Amino acid sequence: MSFLPSWLDPEVILRGMGGWALAVLCLIIFAECGLLIGFFLPGDSLLFVAGLFVATGTIETPLWLVCALVTVCAFVGNVCGYWIGSKVGPSLFNKPNSKLFKREHVAKTHEFFEKYGARAIIMARFVPIVRTFITATAGVGRMDAKRFFSYSAVGAFLWASGVTILGYFLGEVDFIEKNIDAMAILIVLISVIPIAIEVLKARREKKQATKLANDDTQIIEHL
């Protein structure tokens, strides 16, 4: 049973589009990576299902071409998001909450970006919502364009091609095929492991810094 409403179910979306499935997939990946209104789209599960459909012949396009197309769309989406952030981001990000726009999404993304810097562009690819807003945040912050595009290209390849290839090779396993939504959630959980490691590392370093500061204070007081 799908955890998603039918209009967000990746199998329903791709099967319902018939011969337009690949075009719709590319459009959704672009929107999720570049347009702020695309944060709710199921990019991870769509890529996984697309890989499965290539393996089963539902999508007749060769795997390498599908990977190339979704990677390009993910990268171009980032470029578009960066442009939005650099041109209209400050005024847009200061607007009040609406049904589709939540200031907390921007705040969390900004905190994520501040903590991890340029590598956040790659790490955020695997985190829903964050991957949508972080590109515009980079634009607002006037991150060096060349640096941003370089990291975006790497992240686009690892995410878009990686998840699609994963779906291609694992999607035909009976248990996985019957639990695609659960697999999509698992992919997200696995992908945030590096982020969790970074958070724990940062906390440990902060504790050590605090302990050293306290020790120095005690030494000074004794003197």
Image: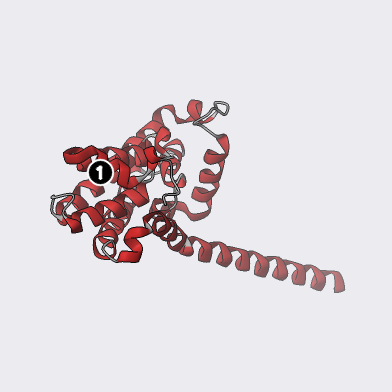
* Residue depicted at 50% across the width and 25% down the height: 91
Residue 86 in the image: above or below residue 210: above
* Residue depicted at 54% across the width and 26% down the height: 95
Q: Is residue 94 visible?
A: yes
Res 34 → quadrant:
top left
Looking at the image, which is closer to me, 32 or 141?
32
The residue tagged with tag 1: helix, strand or loop?
helix
**Number of numbered markers:** 1
Amino acid type, residue under disc 1 in the picture: Arg
Q: Is residue 45 left or right of residue 213?
A: left
Q: Is residue 134 left or right of residue 215?
A: left
Residue 156 in the image: above or below residue 107: below
Q: Position of residue 114 (x, y in %)?
A: 52, 49
Residue 203 in the image: above or below residue 36: below
How did the renderer colour the structure?
secondary structure
Q: Position of residue 199 (x, y in %)?
A: 56, 62
Looking at the image, which is closer to me, 178 or 143?
178
* Residue depicted at 38% across the width and 31% down the height: 84
